[in-house]
Amino acid sequence: MLILDILYVLLLLCTFPFWVKYIFKKKYRRLLKDRLRPQIPACSEPTIWLHAVSVGEVRSLKSLIQRLSEKKQDVILSVTTPSGYEFARKEYPGLRVILSPLDLSFTVKRFIRCLNPKLVIFNELEVWPNWISLLRRKNIPMLLINGRISAAAFRRYRFFSFFLWRFFRQIDCFLVQNNIYKKRFQQLRIPAERIVVCGNIKADEADRSMRQLPTRQEVLAHLRLGSLSKKIITLASSHGGSESIVIPAIERLSAGFLFIIVPRHVQRAQTIARQLKRSGLKYAIFSRQQPMAPDIQVLIYDRMGYLLPIMSVTDIVFMGGTHDAKIGGHNLYEPAAMGKLIVGGPHYNNFPDIGSELEAAGVYHQINQSQELVDFADRFQDLDLDRIAQKALKAVAQRKGSLACTLDQIQRFIG
C-alpha cells in the first residue's frame, strides 16, 4: 500500500499543470476535502456500503436501496462523480450519500473506520487497489453487482492483468450481466465459482420506474408546452457526436416535430445553445423560465433527474452516446420499457444484449447522418408503432429478475 501511495503522489506531481487551476476554485477544494474525509458522523452500528460511479449507476440502484431499507439494513451510498453525487442527494433524500474516497491508504482507512461496513457492494466495475486491499485485510466481504467489462476495457485489463488480478481475486463474489462478461472475468483469472450471471439490474429498475411516471399532461405542463400539436423527438443524454447529426436536421423537420435536447452533462447547455443559434434555430433553455413561443423549434432541458418523464411523452428517442465507441451509448432499457421507438448510432456496446435484440426487432434504428434522420422522420407515420412497442416491452420483460438474484446473493453475506 505504501508503494501505491508513492505511485499516486508521483502521478499527481507529473500531472500538476493539468489540475493546479482547480486548487483556486472553492467548489473543487470542497470536493477534495470530502474525498479525503467522509462528511458524516461515525457509524456505531455496522452498515452496508454501496458504491456507484455516476448518474446512471446511481439511478439503477433505487429498487435495491429500497429493498435493503425494507430489510432494516443501514445503507450508505458513495459516488465517484460530482454529477452522480448531486443526483444521489436529490434522488435519495433520506439516505446518507458521500463522495467516494481517494485511493490513498490513510484516506481509505478513515472511511472504513467511519462507515463501519459489514459488506461493501460495488456497482458495475471500479477497482481501486488500496480500497480493496484494506477491506480484505479487515475481512470485510466485497460484492460486485451488475458487473460488465466492455471489449475495450477488457483489452486494457488483460494488458495489466499481471498487476490487477490480485485485486480482482480479493472480491468475494461477482454478479455479472451475461455469459460474455462471465467469460471475460474468468480470463482475468477469477475462479468460475465466484461468478454468478444475474442479468442487468437496469432492466428491473426501468420496469419499476415506468409505473411511477407523471401523466402526459403533467409532463407537458412542467415543460411549459401546453397543448402541443407536434410530435416530439428527444435527444436523450446527448453528446457532441449525436448533436452534430440532429441539429442540422431540425430546420427540415420542425414543421412536424419539436426537438428536446437533454444533455448528458447539463453544463453543456450553453454550448448547445450556441450551436443552435449559429444554425439559425429558435430555442429555449428550460432553466431560464422562458415562455414557450409557438415558433420554438428546440427546448434544451438543462436539469437533472427528469429524463424519464420527458421520454415518456416522446415519439422518437434519439439515444446519445451511441456515435462514440468510447462512450458506448446510454441506457436503452428505459425507452424500451416505455415501448418507444429508438434511434441512434452503431455504438451501444454498454448494452450489447438488448441493443442487438432491439435493432433486430426493428425497435432500434441506426441513424448516422442528418439526412437519414430526416428520411426516417418522414416515414414515421407509416411505422407500426403498436408492434414496435410490444417488441420493446418483451425485450425488457425477458431480462427482469436481476434484482431478486442480487438480493439473494447479498443475503448470503449479511445473514
Image (cartoon, rainbow, N blue to C red):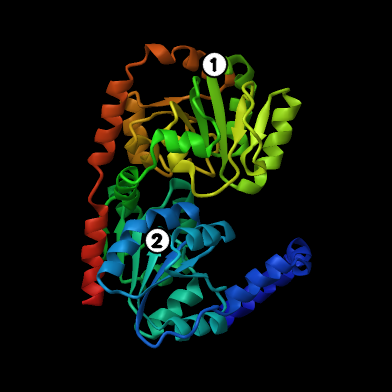
Left/right of residue 197 with respect to residue 276 in the rendered view: left
Local packing at callout 1 (Cα closer than 10 Å; few below 14, some 14-19, many 20+) is some
Q: Nearer the viewer, residue 67 or 401?
A: 67
Residue occupying image coordinates x 71% and y 31%: 275
Q: Residue 80, how many percent across, how many down?
A: 53, 63
Left/right of residue 294 with respect to residue 204 in the rendered view: right
- Looking at numbered disc 2 in the image, what kind of residue is underneath it? Asn
Residue occupying image coordinates x 42% and y 43%: 331
Quarter occupied by the C terminus: bottom left
Q: Residue 44, how many percent across, how many down?
A: 39, 88
Local packing at callout 2 (Cα closer than 10 Å; few below 14, some 14-19, many 20+) is many
Q: Residue 103, how many percent across, how many down?
A: 55, 74
The answer to which quarter of the image holds residue 133 is bottom left
- Looking at numbered disc 1 in the image, what kind of residue is underneath it? Val
Residue occupying image coordinates x 64% and y 41%: 289
Left/right of residue 4 with respect to residue 281 in the rendered view: left
Say which residue label 2 marks. Answer: 123
Q: Nearer the viewer, residue 414 or 86?
A: 86
Numbered label attached to residue 374 = 1
Nearer the observer, disc 2 or disc 1?
Answer: 1
